[in-house]
Image (spheres, rainbow, N blue to C red):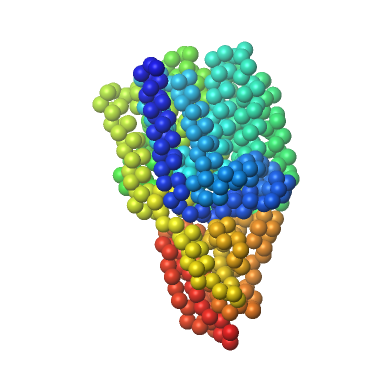
Amino acid sequence: MRSGTRYLLLAFLAGAAVRLLFLGSRSFWHDEALSLLIAGRPSFAEVWRLASPLQFGAPAYFLALHGWLALGHGESAVRLLSVAGSLAALAATFALARAWLSPASLLAGVWLAALLPFSIEYAQEARTYAWLSAFELAAALAVARGLARPGGRWTAAFAAALFLASATHPAAWIWWTGIFAGLALTPEGRRLLPRGAAASVPAALVTGLGFLASRAVWRDRLADAFRLPSATEYLRQTALLFTAGHAPGVWAEAVLPFAVPVLAGVGVWAIAREPRRRPAAAVLAALTVVPVGLVWFGIAAGASTQLRYVAAVPPVLALVLAAGAGALPRWARAAALLLLLGAQADAFRRGLKGPPSLEPTFCLLSKKPVREATWFVRAGFRPGDRIVHVSTAALLPMRWYAPDLPQGYLIDNPDLTPAVSRPLVGPPAPLERQLEGARRIWLVSCPWRFRDAPVVPGDLASVLGRRCGTPQVRSFGGLDVYLAVVKGK
């Protein structure tokens, strides 16, 4: 085995190790539990019926998870499906690096991609994004093969990858828009456009029919969408998330938003210096700009788009950043790589010690509040008790952990449409109605984000005080359980 191949294999094994590290340490959170409650339905047909409106006609991951659950229902067993997708994405990234990077930048690129916190986060979630990234990077790899051998059989692989990506997540079109934009920038790329467009027809049909069939759902999403404070803030978060993940350190927050765009620009220029790699530089540049730009536009337009929808961008960006570092003088190259790898290491350190600062989904050794709370409630549960959740933030995971316990909730999740939520958990009901016929109530308050304190809204507290005795409170690292006896029982 050649030394270069050995280094690539070592980087891949390191990437696999960090994706498996503490895989089962966190309890399932809301979105993972949603995946499980849908995938856990008795038949493939029922999974298809529930997942299609949620995913705008792209239920492939839920169907795969339905079959995967035969291997086990625990955190590690369930998340191994996403680990497999992330490793497939990593293999495609390595192949892209060998095709498009110079030997001087190759090793730095694969190591940066292997240790990307953003990719590792979604490798450790029972969600669609790891496999979406794998299929999208496979499509980019097919384009790389087409640019190297225009007459080759790259279109079949390209069509299959785009179709699978579009069947996995409805936002896959954002990625292949970036691919076509990159191909349009060079004469070599434009020669591939007719065959590429023909190959994308099945994927376009899946996406278009899915959106048409789910038009009521996406209209609700548009109406309830959020907005970020400014484009500058969104650009800052993009640079941080794609290089240091959801838990960047203070120094990374100060440096990376400025260093990443500059280094990426240098990387595209460095790749484009070689005429034979100029088409590759165009595609890489488009894949780091166009998908993110479309997500920005979606947020500005009021659509509920998120950076996780373009989870294939960070590995590509890692390759571009490695090329940028490789074009610098030796001392500057070392400084740039130390900056990027140091930001990754600091993100892991912070993830081990505390919750993230940008989003609630990743913390390597975070406490397991829903799982521990479920054990606590189950141990003390008696006939006539009722569990009531303030919102679905804890309801969905606890439903998965304890499907036999009667559970209700008070407040709908605005991102979860009734077409999906009602078959899974039924409708919400006021606390007064939930108390009818109950001897004791377990009221569970769980915030949507780690930083938010669990609270009982004032109107609920007044009902609780009027209808129940003084509650006992047990806290589970961001989740509170109130146990109270209903008066007159």
Q: Residue furthest bottom?
A: 488
| Residue in the foreground of this view, choosing between 344 and 63 | 63
Spot occupied by residue 485 in the image (x, y as percentages of width and height): 53, 80
Going 65% across and 37% down the picture, which residue do you hit? 167
Rendered-image quadrant of the N terminus = top left
Going 35% across and 22% down the picture, which residue do you hit? 327
| Residue in the foreground of this view, choosing between 308 and 181 | 308
Q: As displayed, is residue 170 above or below residue 484?
A: above
On the question of residue 370 being in view, the answer is yes
Relative placement, left or right, of 155 versus 390 is right
Spot occupied by residue 115 in the image (x, y as percentages of width and height): 40, 36
Relative placement, left or right, of 271 versus 279 is left
Spot occupied by residue 306 in the image (x, y as percentages of width and height): 54, 45
On the question of residue 323 being in view, the answer is no
Identify the image quadrant of residue 424: bottom right
Rendered-image quadrant of the C terminus = bottom right
**Count of labels in the image:** 0
Relative placement, left or right, of 168 versus 252 is right
Going 56% across and 28% down the picture, which residue do you hit? 138
Relative placement, left or right, of 145 versus 199 is left
Q: As displayed, is residue 291 above or below residue 156?
A: below
Q: As displayed, is residue 143 above or below residue 343?
A: above
